[in-house]
Amino acid sequence: MKKGGGVSLSVLFFLVIVILPGKVQLPAQDGGIRVSGVLDSSVTVGTGAGDTPAFFYGLEEYANLRIQARLRERAVFYGAFNFIAASGISAEAAAALAPSAFAAGENYIAALELERLYFRLNGEHLDVEAGLMRLAFGYGQAFSPMDFLNPRNPLSPDARPRAVLGGALYYYPADTAKVLAFGAGPRNPFASGGGGILAGISGEQHWDKASLQALYAFEAPDGAGQGTSRMGLSLKADLEVGVTADLLYAYNGEHSTPPAGGTGVEGLAAAAGVDYSFGEGRFYTLAEYLYSGSASSTSTNSRNPSGFSRQNYLFTQILYRFSDYTNISLGCLTGFDDSSFSLLIGAEHELFQGMKLSLSCRIPLDRSVFQLGVKAQLRF
């Protein structure tokens, strides 16, 4: 696509999905079209050492637009699109997010990314979803090993969860229980031989103050091998304090026998945490521990380059609310294996409903970079 043509098409697309739904509404009995979204304007500056520039900056304009169209009570269509314009270090992140940047100016690159595109059919006890969608698992807060398709990292709180192309079947045997059968295509979209295809099943049970989720998933081998089986369990409970436990074990035969001096749990990722609010809800505290085996879904590898390179981590956070509109927070991620740590400082203020300003300061584990970010977010 030509550079100039990409901009004009994006403007046309924006007008169609934002203005048209406001002018054309389906009859109430047939449902309707709903458009919502978020617009982030962010500025990042920092200083570095070593291979990182002594001074760096980043500018980004990010819009996520979501469309929902309902057909009576049985069918719903969902679509979501990301518009990105960036420069500086933000341009590098945007290029990694959407490599096919469709337009470039003198001081920016721009991209359009399809984030979600799926439908849902609702039945009495059975629901069906299919398309480009998000499959999320586990109850972890700072870490969530069982969410193996998009494991969380508190160093990247603004990371945008990735979607998978597949389908899901939901069965509700009771009001407090759910069974999910799912399947998804491989991470490599050009793999047509079946290697990397995922299939699995999960179940949830909810009580008044506790919830339990179990998961089994199988990933077909990509070439020679036995494939990878993943077994997970996640628990949350609301006692005097909030308690979460989340673990996932990956087994593919390659690390079933521990190496000399090994522990035999290379495929295990496990997290456990507690959270507590006090001072009439003004103070919120969180502490969560993560063990990340070298062959687990949370470790750094070719499938998860943003994962954890160490094995033992502790994340702690305290948040103070001045009011319903303003809060500050201090977090620390500590790597026990080498006594490394990373600080995260944040502040948020809601100017009015739908408009929020935030300030963040991050120092990574190797402490080679100091990064300061300011963001204005508008929800509509």
Image: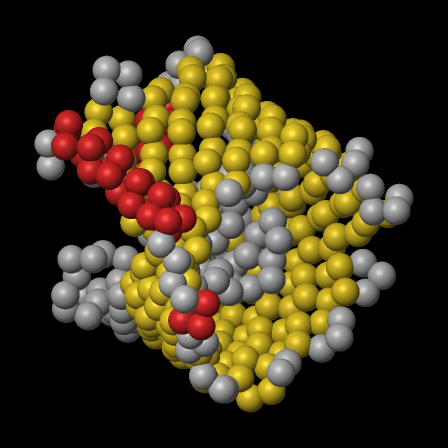
Query: Splitting the image into 4 quarters, where does residue 376 fall?
Result: top right
Determine whether, in the image, residue 155 is placed left or right of residue 110. Answer: right
Task: Tell how many labels.
Answer: 0
For residue 337, say whether it is visible.
no
| Residue occupying the far left of the picture | 2
User: Which of 174 and 195 lies nearest the eye of the viewer?
Assistant: 174
Q: Position of residue 349 (x, y in %)?
A: 67, 31
350 left or right of 369 in image? right
In the image, taking residue 87 as reference, residue 248 lies left or right, namely right
Write the residue at 31% across / 40% down. 14
The quadrant in which the N terminus is found is top left
Point 66% across, 58% down: residue = 272
x, y (%) of residue 83?
A: 33, 38
Residue at (60% x, 68% y) in the render: 234
Above or below 241: residue 325 = above
Estimate the x, y position of residue 86 in percent, counting from the top left.
34, 26
In this picture the colour scheme is: secondary structure
Q: Nearer the viewer, residue 87 or 184?
A: 87
Question: 175 above or below 85?
Answer: below
Q: Position of residue 285 (x, y in %)?
A: 76, 45
Q: Residue at x 34, y 34 (%)?
A: 84
Q: Residue furthest right?
A: 279
Residue 23 in sight? yes
Res 257 quadrant in image: bottom left
Q: Is residue 50 left or right of residue 236?
A: left
